[in-house]
Image (tube, rainbow, N blue to C red):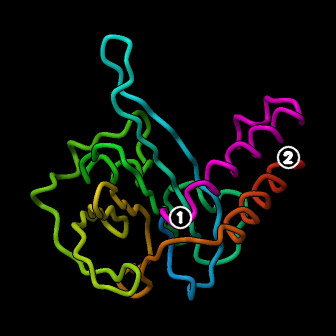
Amino acid sequence: MREMGRLSPDAVKALVSSQIEQYEQLAGRIYGLSSTWTGFRYLGGFERTGTETHGRTIRRDWSCTLGHIDGPYHLGAANNGAGTQPYVSIITTTEPGQSLAWHLARSLRIAPGPPRPELLGTDQEAAPVTIPVDGTDVTFTVLTRDHYFAAKVEVGEMRIVAIGAGMTLADIGLERVDDLTAYIDGFKHIARENGLEL
């Protein structure tokens, strides 16, 4: 949201509309927490990438994040740092996978400077954890440090990655998101809290 503060109101509205449209095109293919979970939901970010060889695009990937905060949103609640509310970001992506240590470093974001995943262990140190996905138990690999975690699993050509702190996904479960209304409303709420009118 901070980047948006440098844009004109019309540019912000166009950017937000574009983000929401990208999400809506993927409804039914992206994952969030179970619909029975009652915390705060928001759109966390969307990205398309392409791999080129000799000027030809040979692979197009996307990565889509849905955010969840256990409790009402307040400024700073989703900053992924020490002392924040329990949260989890669910990333659905077709991109080749990063290591769990990389995702855990992204979740921590405590120390100054760039993340240092090499300090957090390797995927070989990850433990299996069963998490319900669309009502079926699925085995994720999970790497933890203190109360922070990073978990991932491959589902067909997609990867589901969960990063966060203070929440137990095995008790909540994940499911495909068909209706993005709660996430869009949450995204707009965060924008207003940051002084942006959409």
Chain part drawn in magenta: 1-29
CA gap, disc 1 to disc 2? Answer: 26 Å
Q: Earlier in the sequence, mark 1 or mark 2?
A: 1
Identify whether 68 is placed above or below 6.
Answer: below
- Residue type beneath disc 2: Leu
Residue 153, image x, y percentages: 27, 64
Q: Quadrant of residue 75?
A: bottom right
Q: In this rendering, would 117 be left or right of 55? A: left
Which residue appears farthest toward the top when viewing the image?
A: 54
Towards the viewer: 129 or 178:
178
- Residue at 41% x, 40% y is 61
Q: Is residue 17 magenta?
A: yes
Identify whether 149 is placed above or below 129.
Answer: above
- Where residue 196 is drawn, which disc sits there? 2
Q: Main secondary structure of the magenta part?
A: helix
- Residue at 41% x, 81% y is 134
Mark 2: few/some/many CA within 10 Å (<14, 14-19, 20+)? some
Q: Quadrant of the N terminus?
A: top right
- Residue type beneath disc 1: Gly
Which numbered mark, 1 or 2, is in the foreground of this view? 2
Name the residue beneath numbered marker 1: 83
Q: In this rendering, would 104 be left or right of 118? A: right
Towards the viewer: 84 or 59:
59
